[in-house]
Image: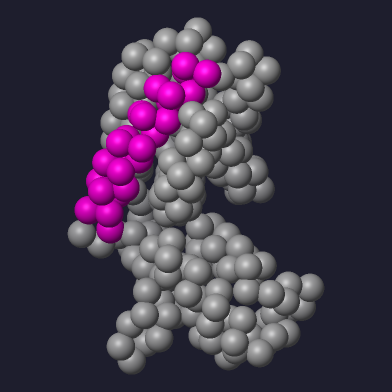
Amino acid sequence: MRDRQVANPDSIYERLKQDIICQTIEPGEALIEEKIATRFGVSRTPVRQAFALLANTGLVSQRPHQGVVANPIRFRDIHDLYQVRTILEAGSAELAASRATEEECRKLRKLAQAGYRFRDRSTYERFIKNNFDFHVGIARLSGNEILARLIEPNLDMMHRIFWASLDIQDYNEEATDEHLELVAAISAHDPVRARTLTEQQMRNSEKRAISALIHSSGLQISV
């Protein structure tokens, strides 16, 4: 299948990133430079540039005798990612609670309520996009753009784990309730509660992700 409307490294990167997150490119699968260049109707140069962008997110790596490979999902990486997210996002929620307007909180509530239908994959991509916008939105409300930029690549790696777990167990209602509770704390200008809720919700989310992946029968997970 060709995607010739995409012709620059950034667009190729975005398309390949989505393929990795959605498991169209599976963990451990090699990304063949020539095939991808043919798919997008470009030379190998923009493909190599897109590979470099993907490597910066941690989604792929260069392997001897294999070339560029989609990184496996490893349990230790899940823990490390949640640890980093907790440090960054608890701080961003605390700062956001000190300065967010009610209009900004209204937008967050709308994103928080945008869930998915269990085992309906046509709803997953939109859910993951809304989840990304929700967490990055809180980070931007902190007023610290560097903090927002640090959070974004961690969410890209995390969303690949989310996608892998969405078919296994339905946590839609629980996650929505948690997000709405966090928005309420931000709207009430309660920084301490916003931080505390974020820390607790990260622990809950990590447990849900690991539990779902442990019970997955079709996904290869490494230690």
| Residue at horizontal 30 percent and vertical 43 percent from the top | 84
| 145 versus 77 height, above or below | above
| 142 versus 33 height, above or below | above
Seen from the viewer's position, the closer of residues 60 and 46 is: 46
Seen from the viewer's position, the closer of residues 18 and 96 is: 96
Seen from the viewer's position, the closer of residues 159 and 174 is: 159
Q: Is residue 222 visible?
A: yes
| Image location (x, y in percent) of residue 99 | 52, 18
Q: Quadrant of residue 11?
A: bottom right
Asked if residue 135 lies in the magenta stretch, the reply is: no
Is 123 positioned to the left or the right of 168 in the image?
right
| Residue at horizontal 63 percent and vertical 13 percent from the top | 102
| 33 versus 145 height, above or below | below
| Image location (x, y in percent) of residue 23 | 50, 61
- Quadrant in which the C terminus is drawn: bottom left
| Residue at horizontal 47 percent and vertical 16 percent from the top | 98
| Image location (x, y in percent) of residue 160 | 45, 54
Residue at the right extreme, as displayed: 5
Q: Is residue 173 visible?
A: no
| Image location (x, y in percent) of residue 86 | 32, 35
Where does the magenta region start and end?
74-99
